[in-house]
Image (cartoon, helix red, strand yellow):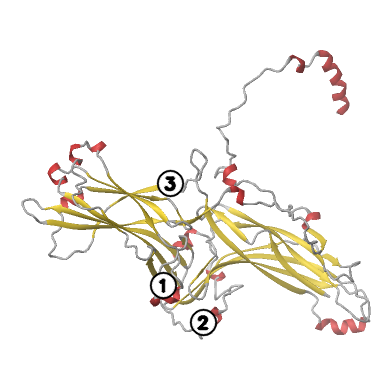
Amino acid sequence: MSISIDIVPIADTLEMYGDADKSSAYSLSGHVSISVSSPYSLFERRKTARILLHSVTLTFEGQTEVLTPPTGYSSARICSLTREIAPPEPVEMSNEGHEDSNAPCVWNVVFDLPIPGWLPPTENYGAEDVGVRYGLFAEAKFSHICENQSTAFSFALCSPFRSRVKTLHAQKNIGIRRVICSPEDETGARDDQQTITYLVNANLAPSPEKVRRFPAEVLKKMQVLTSVPESVDVERNEFPLVIRMRMKDLVAEECKRVQVTSISANVIQKEKYRSNISSNYARRYPIPSRSQQPPHLPLRDPHPIGSFYETGLGVYGGGEGSASRSFSLLPPGESGIYSLGEKHYAFENDADCPADSATWYTLETSVPFVRQAPDDKTLEWCGHPLLRASVASPLISIAHEVALGLTCTYDVPGTTEVAVERLSFAIPLTFAFFAPGAGHYRCITPPPVNSPELVMTQIQTQTPEPGSPMQYAPTLPAYSQLFDRNGDRKIDYLVPLPLYTPRPASASSSNEDLSEMLPLLSTGL
């Protein structure tokens, strides 16, 4: 007889919303199909295939792998969740009545696994496409039921050499994609430009000793505010940048000597690869203990290249604890420098304004970026320099920042000299994928797994007729549109409550009506 199992999830990719959150979980539903068919025979009628299913175990496991010349090959288990999804008692399965059919008899064992909401997204890194992966692993244990058993002597003789309980395995890759919900403005339109403002302390850039420097007391009076989006959409090609500056409590004569001549902005992506699990990450999230990590407990589905390094045949020597690289995401030919011209004494009126109402010199621009920077031949082991979403995982972290530079001049009093200073500072950025409209998503509710009559259902596999209509899941709104983060249902206060109207006289019950209703009530009791 022929027996096989297959994992059929409702969706191959699980989308998680917002930042990593230990207090949230997502449902991963589907079923494990068990197919039974009779072997084909030319000389006799096919025999009925009968098996006894003992258990079906389903495991969801996540893993991360790293391969770099400085670190070599490293791997870690991110999570592992195992559930027994079959009934506790053995279940008999047979294809009785369908022995001659070319299609097998199929039983579906439904499952609904709670997936932690803090998991990093699926991603490939480096030239060998190692990275973060997730998968479902099913294991079914069964034994054959023989109708025409041979003599007791032959059965006793052969039984020690036969495997009474056999095991079947199946595997299915599952992707995790993390997105953020785009806020909506008052008109209900999508608003991606919610900003966060930083008060920065400028750092003096290195300068030759012969160059005249700014007076320290002038620089201390300069205040700089920088506003960037809370999250930048990876699928766009620019983001807004606002810089506000002023001189606070600086005398008028000094304010009139300071100019701003240019501004520079550069988008930087920083990647870090580790050979060991980050201690900071281990404190924040409940990853498996050291005894559950390789090499104590190998990964269920390691990358094939890992076996070369475990046996010492790998090319990269390794030995270092981490490797990193950073690159600019500015478009080719874009310097990121914006000249403001000459005679820009932007702070000349700051001294005349009260401290609580001082004017701010505002610079607004849009900073462009590309999804793939020019290749760096010296770092080919990292793969192509692609724009990725900001993420933190046990062995890999991706961070972004916008490096800003302000070139200012100061007219030295009593001379014709001009002191030049370049103030530099870095502002963190968060790149993310934005979720599309709520109508893009579909939600399918599986049958409850605690219902015995729905846990296992037998179906006959059939090929749909050409042109037959397909059944789709109903379109439902996103969870965030219906409920708050604490689970309370949202109330739409824009829809007014109906005005109170008294009940009409005909609706009031008379004594005669009550007398007619009382016998009915007493009879119902």
Mark 1, mark 2: which one is toward the viewer? 1
Secondary element under disc 1, as helix, strand or loop, is: loop
- Placement of the N terminus among the 4 image quadrants: bottom right
Q: Residues within 10 Å of mark 2 (few under 14, many from 20)?
A: some
Callout 3 amino acid:
Gln
Vertical position of residue 248 compared to residue 39: above or below: above
| Residue at which label 2 appears | 309
- Placement of the C terminus among the 4 image quadrants: top right
In the image, what residue occupies the spot 44% across and 53% down? 231
Callout 1 amino acid:
Asp
Looking at the image, tell me whether mark 1 or mark 2 is earlier in sequence order.
2
Looking at the image, tell me whether mark 3 or mark 2 is earlier in sequence order.
3
In the image, what residue occupies the spot 60% across and 27% down? 497
> Residue 225 at x, y = what percent?
31, 48
Alpha-carbon span between mark 1 and mark 2: 27 Å
Mark 3, mark 1: which one is toward the viewer? 1
> Residue 509 at x, y = what percent?
78, 16
Q: Residues within 10 Å of mark 1 (few under 14, many from 20)?
A: few
Residue 137, quarter of picture: bottom right
- Quick one: 153 or 445, which is closer to the camera? 445
Alpha-carbon span between mark 3 and mark 2: 47 Å
Callout 2 amino acid:
Tyr
- Residue 355 lies left or right of residue 272; in this view the side is left
| Residue at which label 1 appears | 375
> Residue 27 at x, y = what percent?
64, 55
| Residue at which label 3 appears | 194
Vertical position of residue 299 compared to residue 312: above or below: above
Q: Residues within 10 Å of mark 3 (few under 14, many from 20)?
A: some
**From this viewpoint, is residue 116 visible?**
no
In the image, what residue occupies the spot 31% across and 62% down? 335
Secondary element under disc 2, as helix, strand or loop, is: helix
